[in-house]
Amino acid sequence: AMLYVATGKHSYVVIALVLAAVGAVAMWSIFSHVQVRVATWLNPFADADATGYQLTQAIYSMAEAYMLPHGLAKLHPGRKTPVNALILIGGISLLAPFFGRTALVWISDAASFACCVAYCMVALSFLALRKKEPDMRRPYRVRHYKLVGTLASCMSAFMVVMFVLPGTGATLLAQEWVIVGAWTGLGVVFYAVSKKRYGERFGSVNTRLEEV
């Protein structure tokens, strides 16, 4: 779709799809870790403590904590994947290219800034959690966590600064700041609505991952 928006040539879309399909099958046949990723995508809860750890954590951190409408936590009875969430994100992804290349660049840059902020928050949360909950069960325990967490926090914070300071080459445009502001505002709305709707359940996880 993006190639069609950029060039207007239908043949490029067909060629890209064919090459992508051939490449995907080839990579799946050659590399075992690609097979693991595909299996994890099909059923991330089959091995929640290992191959599906990242996906399951991302899903349950919001769904089971009632920080978003709980309907997004609905799981497919067979695949155990978040059906409603996948439909929502898939629909948005299908519509996005029709906004045009310029708008897609704005969205991409704003999303990159948001990711860097998220990286920094995750790194800081990692340090805080290791200090507050040192005996928590963890599938993988990082050695020298203070050094690793501090470096991760500093590096991600540096990337955030690069987006903010003018003249760095990565500085966000006014349109991109509008997108960041709108997305932040939407998050505030979801926070307020979910907190009011779910009350004491907001921010609490009652379902253990092992029980899924």
Image (tube, rainbow, N blue to C red):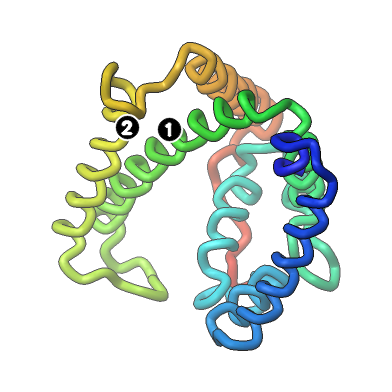
The answer to whether the residues at label 2 and label 1 have Cβ atoms under 8 Å apart is yes
Name the quadrant containing residue 149: bottom left
User: What residue would you read off at disc 1?
Assistant: 113
Residue drawn at x 50%, y 77% is: 50
* Marking on residue 5: none
Q: Position of residue 39 (x, y in %)?
A: 67, 78
Q: Along the horizontal axis of the image, is 27 left or right of 137?
A: right
Q: Does residue 165 appear in the picture of this structure? A: yes
**Position of residue 36 in the picture relative to residue 146 (left or right):** right
Q: Position of residue 166 (x, y in %)?
A: 28, 17
Residue at screen point 66% across, 74% down = 38
Report which quarter residue 76 is drawn in: bottom right
Q: What amino acid is at disc 1?
A: Phe
Q: Quadrant of the N terminus?
A: top right
Mark toward the start of the polypeptide (2 vs 1) = 1
Instruction: Look at the image and tell me in which quarter the C terminus lies.
Output: bottom right
Identify which residue is drawn at 23% across, 45% down: 155
Tell me the residue that label 2 is attached to: 160
| Crowd rating for badge 2 (residues with CA inside 10 Å; few <14, some 14–19, many 20+) | many
When the figure is inspected, residue 60 is found, relative to residue 8, above or below; the finding is: below
Work out whether 166 lies above or below 206: above
Question: Residue at coordinates 61% horizontally, 24% vertically from top-left?
Answer: 102
Quarter of the rendering containing residue 206 = bottom right
The local secondary structure at tag 2 comes to: helix
State the residue in front, 191 or 31.
31
